[in-house]
Amino acid sequence: MTVATGRIRAEVRSGLGDLVLDRSDALNALDPPMVWAITETLREWAGDDSVHTVVVRGATSRAFCAGGDIRLVREQVLGGRTADAMTFFREEYALDAIIAEYPKPYVALLDGVAMGGGLGLSVHGAHRVVTEHSVLAMPETMIGFVPDVGASHFLPRLAPGWGRYLGLTGLRTGATGTLHSGLATHFVPRAGLEELTDALARDGVAALADASRPLPPGPDDGPDPAVLRVFAGTDLPRLEEALEALPGPHAARALAALRAVSPSSVSATDELLRHGAGSELAACLARELEVVGEVIGRPDFDEGVRCALVDRGETPTWNPARPLSGDHR
């Protein structure tokens, strides 16, 4: 089977289902046709006995997937088509659930940028490969939104402190941080990805052990242990104060990020993560869908997406501007 939709390219070769995200002009951001095409492809391969392994990757080295097409969602909401936006989220979350329960080995090659919906396409699978060029994040609080695509399930299950750090601040991390946190499972240099793909066709996921390499020397791209301890053990109303008391650039960076993002989004995110820590994925996705339905109608969402993606470079004015709390309602 070979499929080319203008959004994805899908081919079965030597038993490998090779799924390539091919919306390079938008950094492979997910829109409704793309979600539909990926869903239908994965469903077909799940029942195809000739497919032993699935790999998903980006057509451009710039990005695996920059997330959902949130600019389109804003346009739908402003145009009175909120129901269309919610249909997109519902179908995207259904795709995430398919990946989490996929009956065959599922390998994501997270080269370049992977954010938001890109983590939904990858973290729910068992095998997540990063390179020296990988940049992962859940940046939703920066645009007045909330981490979704099952993030309230996978973020609380990362190494202590990491989930709240990534989810609340929206900050990025590279290969070192993704491996230390648990977002990624393997490191393979970018130069080895094509060879890895060929080996996956030949040997299945056993090829990952041969292709994996130690992290190259260099600075740690994640927060220091003291910052992670604060995020792991500090209630939201006291979080800024606790970070302010810590020395060093890591704490200062996290504090600056918290003070820049939408306070209402931070509060909603913290509540989602708290509930998600004790919930199964299906319950997390249902809860996220409910919260998203509220959030996309709020001024912060319009303001955040406008400043980040429409009138690029503007500083958003959040409403309310303060304070952080543990209740988004």
Image (cartoon, rainbow, N blue to C red):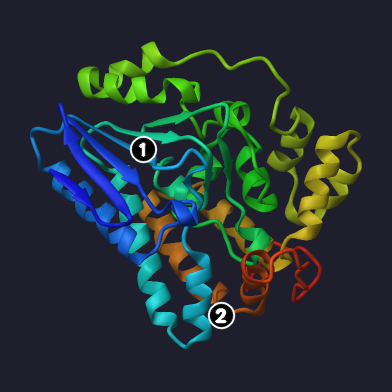
Please report the residue visible at 67 percent of the width from the left and 52 percent of the height from the top: 168
Please report the residue visible at 57 percent of the width from the left and 73 percent of the height from the top: 295
Q: CA distance from mark 1 to mark 2?
A: 31 Å
User: Which quarter of the rendering shows the N terminus?
Assistant: top left
Q: Nearer the viewer, residue 165 or 113?
A: 113
Q: Quadrant of residue 162?
A: top right
Q: Nearer the viewer, residue 106 or 289?
A: 106
Q: Which mark is residue 125?
A: 1
Q: Amino acid at mark 1?
A: Gly
- Secondary structure, mark 1, is loop
Q: Amino acid at mark 2?
A: Gly
Q: Residues within 10 Å of mark 2 (few under 14, many from 20)?
A: some
Q: Earlier in the sequence, mark 1 or mark 2?
A: 1
Q: Residues within 10 Å of mark 1 (few under 14, many from 20)?
A: many
Q: Which mark is residue 297?
A: 2
- Secondary structure, mark 2, is loop
Question: Where residue 85 sits in the image (x, y, percent)?
Answer: 42, 74
User: Quick check: 121 left or right of 322?
Assistant: left
Q: Nearer the viewer, residue 197 or 160?
A: 197
User: Quick check: 36 left or right of 47?
Assistant: right
User: Quick check: 279 left or right of 16?
Assistant: right
Residue 255 in the image: above or below residue 322: above
User: Quick check: 285 left or right of 100?
Assistant: right
Question: Where residue 7 sits in the image (x, y, percent)?
Answer: 33, 56
Please report the residue visible at 73 percent of the width from the left and 23 percent of the height from the top: 219
User: Which quarter of the rendering shows the C terminus?
Assistant: bottom right
